[in-house]
Image (cartoon, grey):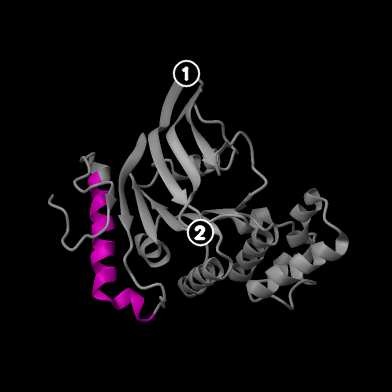
Amino acid sequence: MTFVKGQGMLDVRGLKKVYEGSGRRVEAVRDLTFTVDAGELVCLVGPSGCGKTTLLKCMGGLLTPTAGEVLLQGERVTGPPPGMAFVFQEYGRSLFPWMRVGENVELPLKQKGLSRSRRRELVADALRSVGLADAAGAYPWQLSGGMQQRVAIARALAYEPQVLLMDEPFAAVDAQTRADLEDLVRGLWRERGITILFVTHDIDEAVYLGERVVVLSASPTVVQEQLKVDLPDDRDQLHTRVAPRFAELRTHVYEQIQAAKRGTPRDAPEDAVKTDAPPPA
């Protein structure tokens, strides 16, 4: 990968998305502007129905915005760019049940014109990275839900993306599996240096995973606040989640989301670094 950590990788500028049809007009996203730096892991949270998935689809070139633009390394996104991969919530629908695990992971690589040996090398490396080195010959339906989502992550990794967009990828798995997958994502992020934008409705997950949390307002969506997560880089489920600072950050994000639901203007700077005390009501 040819990027320098700290430089802008993904820029969202004045993004607006309006759905029209059947006599109705719904403004899902009003005016969103933020940047994700190269090698950064940013979590996106907001009230239910605030347009998080719409935003992600616009960023990935799956939807055309009504106004504004998304830039990937300075180039405008007009369709799914080659340097970007997705992991969706519904892993059961994103994997082909009649294809073996290795074939599912390999499928996107066939579009890149790689040799068969190189494709197999990338597939083996990706499956090994997610702890499924021995599962290449299995069918998805033979695996647990958590393992199927690992396959979906492996498929994205094998593609060697610069940017990974993840849309509530752990919402459909149990709590223990979710914790394991969260640690897997942080481990892969640190190991591979991929830029990750992670959409979640879970506040604890956002604070645990992210270097930064972008809090969205209620629909029509704008940025409510951007919060730097000043927790140690080395995090674990046992100690990090009981740390006083984790509780402070979680409380702050929760209060911002509640304020967003009420339509209260944000009461902290957009690039807030510390939140030593909860914001006033």
Position above or below: 231 against 55: below
Position above or below: 15 against 236: above
Name the spot of residue 256 as percent of width and height, x first.
25, 51
**Is residue 115 rendered to the left or right of residue 213?**
right
Label 1 crowd (10 A; few <14 / some 14-19 / many >=20): few
Q: Where is the N terminus found, in terms of image quarters? A: bottom right
Q: Where are the magenta residues, as a range?
A: 238-259
Q: Which residue is more in the foreground, 69 or 219? A: 69
**Is residue 280 rendered to the left or right of residue 15?**
left
Name the spot of residue 54 as percent of width and height, x first.
49, 40
Alpha carbons under labels 1 and 2: distance apart: 43 Å
Task: Decide if residue 122 is in sight here.
Answer: yes
Magenta-drawn stretch contains 256: yes
For the point 83% across and 51% down, the residue is 113
Q: Which mark is residue 39?
A: 2
**Is residue 46 rendered to the left or right of residue 148?**
left
For the point 77% across and 71% down, the residue is 136
For the point 48% across and 51% down, the residue is 7
Q: Which mark is residue 23?
A: 1
Q: Could you tell me the amino acid type at mark 2? A: Gly
Q: Which residue is more in the foreground, 125 or 20? A: 125
Q: Could you tell me the amino acid type at mark 1? A: Gly
